[in-house]
Amino acid sequence: MKTLFKSIISIAAVLVFTTSLSYAEEIYKIGAVNAKRILQESPQAEKAMKMLEKEFSPRDKGLLAAQKKIKALEDKYNKDRAIMSEEERTKLERDVADKARDLKRDQDEFREDLNLRRNEEFGKIQKRVVVAIQKIAEENNYDVILGEGVIFASSKVDISGLVIDYLKKEVSSAP
């Protein structure tokens, strides 16, 4: 009886071992990308940021100049209000309040416009990144590439550097 029991256990062990080997042959190649890193380090993102800065810089400078004017009016009011007539004080208070309200509105519009353009430009870049990831996956025989939602990916599976290199090549080969 003991011999039969040992034989059954031996056969079961062999079956488990051979089954494990057959599963081991089906190892998949998995990669992961860090989208934030790619968007920070890609030349396309750098180019987009410079373009947005150039596009929005004049408006930003205008807003800063308006802030300085309001500050100068406030300083004048605080300095001279004791010697101003009631009418002059009221007029200056109203002028400061109107300019501050206009500035706030202009700042809000500026932020909205900048965010809209930034989203537009980075949407284009994200499409390029997806294409780059797909090409790299095909060329390197990856079965799965993980992106957002990955809690941890070791450097062995992180292909973000490959994607950044691909995007750099894309820029250097562009006319």
Image: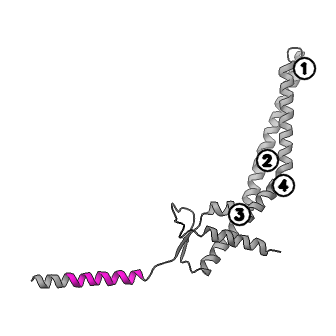
As measured in the structure, the alpha-carbon distance from the residue carrying label 1 to the one carrying label 3 is 52 Å
Q: Residue at x 81, y 34 (%)?
A: 100
Tag count in the figure? 4
Q: Nearer the viewer, mark 1 or mark 3?
A: 3
Residue placed under numbered mark 2 in the picture? 110
Q: How is the image coloured?
A: one colour
Quadrant, the C terminus = bottom right
Residue placed under numbered mark 1 in the picture? 88
Three-letter residue code for mark 3: Gly
Marks 3 and 4 in Cβ contact (< 8 Å): no
Task: Give the answer, above or below, for where 60 lies relative to 87.
Answer: below
The one of 11 and 83 positioned closer to us in this rendering: 11
As measured in the structure, the alpha-carbon distance from the residue carrying label 3 to the one carrying label 2 is 20 Å
- Secondary structure of residue under mark 1: helix
Q: Residues within 10 Å of mark 1 (few under 14, many from 20)?
A: few
Picture quadrant of residue 167: bottom right
Q: Nearer the viewer, mark 3 or mark 4?
A: 4
In primary-sequence order, the first of circles 1 and 3 is 1
Three-letter residue code for mark 1: Glu
Residue placed under numbered mark 4 in the picture? 55
Q: Which residues are magenta?
A: 9-24
As measured in the structure, the alpha-carbon distance from the residue carrying label 4 to the one carrying label 1 is 40 Å
- Secondary structure of residue under mark 2: helix
Q: Residues within 10 Å of mark 4 (few under 14, many from 20)?
A: few
Residue placed under numbered mark 3 in the picture? 123
Residue 12 located within the stretch drawn in magenta: yes
- The percent coordinates of residue 53 (x first, y second) are 80, 53
